[in-house]
Image (cartoon, rainbow, N blue to C red):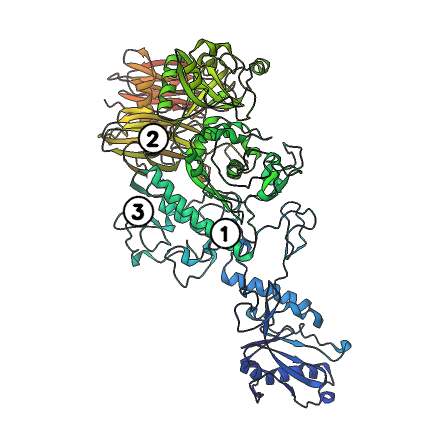
Amino acid sequence: MEITIKGLLLTEEDTNLAYKPTCNTPRRTNFGLNKRDLFKNWRSKVFFFLETASKLVGSAMAHGSASVEIVRGGVVSVIPAQWECQRCTLLNSDHLHRCQVCESPRKMRLPTLSDVETNSTHAQSRSERVDSAVARQTHSDDIRNINRNSSISLVNSTASTALDIADLQIEKHDDVIALHSMEEWQCLSCTFSCNPSFAKRCETCGSEKPSTLRVADLVQEEQRRDINVPNSMETSASDFWNCSKCTFENVKISVVCLMCGQVRSVSGAETWCCSHCTLENLSSDLVCNACQRPKNDHQGGSSGLIHPSSTLCDRANFMATLSKKSHYNGFQEGQNHLHESSLVEDIRKIEEKEANELRMAITNHCKTHGDLFVDDQFPPAPISLFQDPKKPFCQHQICWRRPHEIISRDEMTLPWVVCRTPLPEDISQGTLGNCWFLSALAVLAEKRHLVEHLVLTDSISKEGVYQVRLCKDGIWKTVIIDDLLPCYVNGELIFSKARRKQLWVPLIEKAMAKLHGSYEALVAGKCIEGLSTLTGAPCESISLQGDGSRGEETCPDVIWAKLLSCRDLKFLMGASCGGGTMRANNEEFNQMGLRARHAYSILDVQDLEGNKLIQLRNPWGRFSWKGKWSDGSPAWQQVSLEGRNRLIARGVEQGVFWMEFSDLIRYFDSIDICKIRPDWHESRVTGSFPCHGMQPAQAVKLKVLETTDIDLCLFQQGSRGESATKHPVDLCLVVLQETRHSQQLSVGRLVTHSPRQLHGCVGCNHIFNPGEYLLVPFAFGHWASEPEVSESKQPSYVVSVHSAKQVSVRDSLCDRQYLLADTLIQLAVTKGSREQLRPGVMAYTLMSGWAGSIFVVENVLPDQAVHVRCDCSQSSNVVSTRGTLETLDVVPSYRRQVIMILSHLERSQPYHVSRRLIHRTVRTYQPLMDWAPDQYRQAFHFPEISPHTGPLHAPRLVVE
């Protein structure tokens, strides 16, 4: 037992347990001490109290934890220790663990991020804080800040002789002193930090008190998940990792940085390979996540990746990743996962169940503490509204309100609900320029179940906890938000809203804003991005203008047939008005009732008695088409009454109109199609593009057992928000047959491919026959020809596989050194334009519509090499993988070589490619000689092909 006297610590070993009380009840005892003799000098005063304390230890032990008080005249009182309830302030007996009145637990506060420290560090810092606080307490009226469970309060007879022995250099222990919680809280809106703990609103601006619960730091209770964690795991410095991007110290279980979202790279030392199924598991897993075989003893113990101090969100995200192994996999060193694709609906139900567990944990915490949830990751503050709070895009004064505080003037009698019956006409755009998102949402509202699948919280949450499921950059994410929504000062919503007092529109909008960092990050976009984010389904964009993305002329009849087919398949569609490469005349568009650079929803496609009509909706709910087939147009009188009634049966709605297909092609840039098919199978694989040849290329192996229709999509990190990629890379996905000649050629024949574009996503559709295929994603806009590039700089990607029938997907780091070179050669030879330089020497070029160019030279001369000079110095807004726009190469006999790859650099500006090829033959394999600069006359390539560029540009054997 340990006793503290005003900062002085005594233990059983240091004291003489001479005094014993004569009864079991607390009493006052007069020892009859002669104070006049004992208090002759300061030293005797100290020994007097030391001796008194020694005699009182036994009394304290007999009564349990107690407080011993010495009062005037040497009278000593032994009083049982008590603790003060943090909620109702009642003094309870020490042996009670809950308050006798309000039944609040003795310790209520859950740890936050600042508490996630190692046990030893936490104890030491607490001791230092407490000792420092105790040393400052020099008067008895401040003694209330010291924990009454194990303290001794000394009160001297007079103020002038007050005894303070805190200055004595005596060792203190940290586990006997604690400070009562007298915390103040800081307002997230005005940053005022002196609000008392009992105040529910800020005393300066009136904003609501943030919840004590932090989304990123809610501690996971052991009974909530069946996770194999060692019972006596000690924390150490290795239980944390520093983010390479922001240097924030995260708990080891975190897969991403809690501060900036940077993905953590896991080294091989933190994984172990299952001897039965070869799955790579995290070192903290005691059983294999695939076959459930136990971890072998010789493979070492756990490294503590899953620690009791880890947060609930960390664990939920970590376990969700493991549970999704059937449809989501990531590349790691040495991994080679084989899994079957799963039904889209099955995946959704599994993830909804996992999300519900996390939501219930947060809700229960809020109920226990009587708090309303405030999301600390997306606080009700300017940082959540604007990318730069110093440069707000909106000059209105904005306040944050919960639903019961929001004013809806025309619907005062209706109660707030999440969803009544979602309808497209419910959506109303606010001051935020996110029509691309709202037009996609209006399309979803045509099918109620799609909206219900997004908002997982289907009823009003009294605690203000909501979850929205969105697909960002090809990966499904469940976003936790509160119900504090931006409003005008008068209480009306300032951004998007839903009529009939529904919350589904502002909640989904807030979840989108949180995903991208702020509301301002949602400004401007295309409907296809909204459809992809809201559905996670494969999306396709059809260009309506002559300069299509692949340099192909548009065919209206083919487009019309495709639109009819998409309508019959009940796909979702949207259209972009006056955007892209179109030069829109705003005045002309306004006269026709259209808005340039605006997104519309396509609701229907009809062939009405030979008239090709498209029904569209403006998400603004106003400004309708004024041309042919508009409301009141004479064209309606040219069709039968039955046909007219069939098309306008829904009545005239504001913002909904019919337009002729020819006018759609004239005023609109593109049509976006979202292929919703809940009965299809899905699988997703993550990876990263190599930055140079020293980093291995990654591929996905696809095994098809039955002939099936498959949609493939390749995603990259989006360009929204501060942390997003501002310079997207040129995406392309190539599908090849698995080769039988892996020793000579890395890949087989070309099957299909996506376009090469600087877009967030590219894809392709193909009917696959039974067999094995290789999916090779590549991008070269970021390629470095010489300097070492950190792995953290590698652009990440996601490959999604949607199939009508179940397929097998294997993701792995490819061990084929020349995978990219052989893939590009197959692509150029099959799809490129052919140019015979001379008999036996052929040039293959991929140029128009390829976001740059790819040049391949083939030499099939039996006994001659070819010197090739490729000059692209007159090109603009492109970057070369060789590091220069002019190259010299020697192509040996029966070889093919990727001479140069040019990539479109800045997508907001057009690019131009100018190429000039000069060639000559030599009898033997000779160096460049007089073609090259003097110091490179004996070289065979200029610039030289280094290990960084060799896997891409080295000559490859011609294999038929």
Q: Position of residue 497 (x, y in %)?
A: 56, 34
**Image: 883 above or below 327:** above
**Is residue 783 shown to the viewer in this render?**
no
Query: For this view, does 901 lie left or right of residue 216?
Result: left
Amino acid beneath label 1: Thr
Q: For the point 28% across and 33% down, which residue is it?
A: 702
Residue tagged 3: 279
- In the picture, the disc for residue 776 is 2
Quarter holding residue 498: top right
Residue tagged 1: 363
Amino acid beneath label 2: Val
- 804 vs 156, nearest the viewer: 804
Kindly report the distance in space between the C-alpha atoms of the residues bearing marks 3 and 1: 36 Å
Q: Position of residue 753 (x, y in %)?
A: 34, 24
- 898 vs 528, nearest the viewer: 528
Question: Would you call the spot at circle 3 few (<14 residues within 10 Å), some (14-19), or many (20 or more)?
Answer: many
Q: Nearer the viewer, mark 3 or mark 1?
A: 1
Query: For this view, does 492 lie left or right of residue 833?
Result: right
Query: For this view, does 895 lie left or right of residue 440?
Result: left
Question: Would you call the spot at circle 1 few (<14 residues within 10 Å), some (14-19), or many (20 or more)?
Answer: many
